[in-house]
Amino acid sequence: MPFNGYSLDQCEEEFPKLADFAIDVATKLNPPAPHIFCVQGFQLNPNTSNYLLTEVGYRINGARGARVSYYGAGLSQETALLSCHLDPNYVVKKDPNRPKFHRRYLWYPFVKGTLKSHGGVSNDAPITSKIEYDWFIKEGTKMEAAESFGDFMVFLTIDNADKNAVEKDLLWLEQNYRPDVIA
């Protein structure tokens, strides 16, 4: 389950007219300003502008989304939230001090079985990115299949200075890496 953070112009091909969808929702609901207004939708058909509104929130994204947007698009939602309350005319700007690497996240939900080890990819894997593993459960934990969006055993943080390399590594990991779970 990859989590990617892109600016709207970077994801136009995969999510056409996404900005129009979010602006349409915000215009119709007309939330009071200043504040961050989160619009969440679901793309009904891949690579189309056929979206279904799933949630709106008068808040920043959660823990997963806030990090993704910062490293992907260079926008700190926490800074924007504080700044718009201090100055109603504040305009969100990309952070010029954002690290200059490309980051992707890959989350692994619970599957039925027992986590045997906190093993990573093998040393001979064709990966050039730096990978960090954040485990949520201990070795030996028995799991049932995920029933909630919060049922994750581990997430990987994948960093690389080369955008194409991080995308290549993400794809390889999606297709080849699985946590060490026994049935």
Image (cartoon, rainbow, N blue to C red):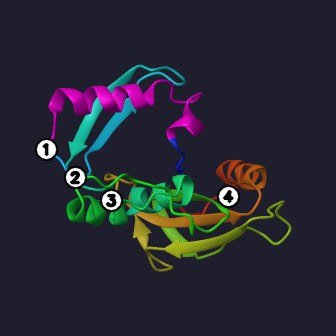
Residue 30 magenta-drawn?
yes
Identify the mark at residue 177; answer none if there is no mark: 4
Please give the residue where the numbered disc 3 appears in the rendered image.
62
Which mark identifies residue 60? none
- The image shows residue 27, relative to residue 147, as above or below, that is above
Q: Nearer the viewer, residue 78 or 51?
A: 78
| Residue 126 in which image quadrant | bottom right
Q: Earlier in the sequence, mark 3 or mark 1?
A: 1
Magenta: main secondary structure: helix
Q: Residue at 36%, 66% (x, y): give it.
A: 79
Badge nearest the viewer, 2 or 4: 2
Distance from the alpha carbon under mark 3 to that under mark 1: 21 Å
Inspect the image, locate mark 2, and give the three-letter code of the amino acid beneath it. His
Task: Tell me if residue 44 comes above or below residue 181 in the rendering.
Answer: above
Decide: is 131 above or below 103: below
Which amino acid lies under the numbered mark 4 shown in the image of this protein? Answer: Tyr
Q: Amino acid at mark 1?
A: Pro
Boundaries of the magenta span: 8-31
How busy is the neighbourhood of tag 3: few (under 14 within 10 Å), some, or many (20 plus)? Answer: few
User: SS for tag 4?
Assistant: loop
Q: Secondary structure at mark 1?
A: loop
Q: Position of residue 75 (x, y in %)?
A: 46, 57
- Label 4 Cα crowd, 10 Å radius (few <14 / some 14-19 / many 20+): some
Residue for badge 2: 35
